[in-house]
Amino acid sequence: MIRKTAIIIGASSEIGLETAKGFASAGYNLALTYNSHEIDTSEFAGDVEIKTYKMDLNNADVKDFFSKVQKDFKSVDCLIYCAGVAQKRAIIFDVTDEEIDKLFEVNIKSAIKCIREFTKLTINKNPANIVLVGSFVDKNGCSCESVYASTKSAMSGLCKSLSTELGNMDIRINLVCPGFINTKMNNNLDEEEKEEIASMTPLKRMGTTKDVSNAILFLSSAGASFITGQTLYVDGGLVLE
């Protein structure tokens, strides 16, 4: 059996790591990127091939990374973009040029570069799949995190556009938008604030990294083979159409 290979950008994040474990359990070989925190793969299930690559998306040579992956694996099937940086809460006139550049570079520009290089490896070779990880703030924005929300909103337009652009090449792309997930990113909230957020959510709880990784894995599976260009909110019903 020829195993499928998934590339996970930002696999050292909490959502990225949980996603990587899910793909390993499903039998995928893995090409995983990290920046400052090396990835411990000792607890991954499955007899799969795993390679890790250090990559700082602020200064990344994306073409070089994909060349390495192409040499290390016979083929690639999935691209999961989990990388992202949050914005320090600030009113717009206090946001610096450096912060703006970093947010756009990591959250959207690098995603576009990775998709560009991934499609070069998969076009007309095999069915391929892309899943971007955005945020529920793309729906209604986020006060004092306007630049961050802008980068995540850009993912929606990218996803819709590429679904029509790449569909006839047998490449699917979808967007997963987590709501309030119980990760270190929300460590600035105390327990009372977390309980208040949970009470606003129809399911009355914060989400887990497993909730998000399950959605990513589904959209990458054969069970989602007729789904493309869609946004799936993993938010317990917090954002309702």
Image (cartoon, rainbow, N blue to C red):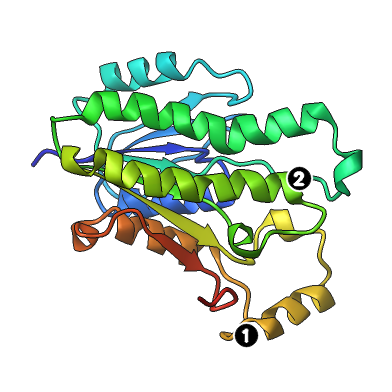
Q: Could you tell whether 49 is left or right of 191 in the image?
A: left
User: Residue 184: horizontal and vertical position, in percent?
Assistant: 70, 55
Q: Which amino acid does label 2 sit on?
A: Gln
User: Residue 107: horizontal and vertical position, in percent?
Assistant: 59, 38
Above or below for 171 versus 110: below
- Depth check, front residue: 120 or 42: 120
The residue identified by callout 2 is: 87
Above or below for 92 versus 236: above
The quarter of the image holding the N terminus is: top left
Residue 126: quadrant of the picture: top left
- Which residue is at a point 58% across and 50% down the rendered structure image? 153
- Judged from the image, the secondary structure of the residue bearing numbered disc 2 is loop
The residue identified by callout 1 is: 204
User: Residue 180: horizontal and vertical position, in percent?
Assistant: 64, 67
Residue most extreme to the right:
94
Above or below for 129 versus 99: below
User: Residue 30: horizontal and vertical position, in percent?
Assistant: 34, 37
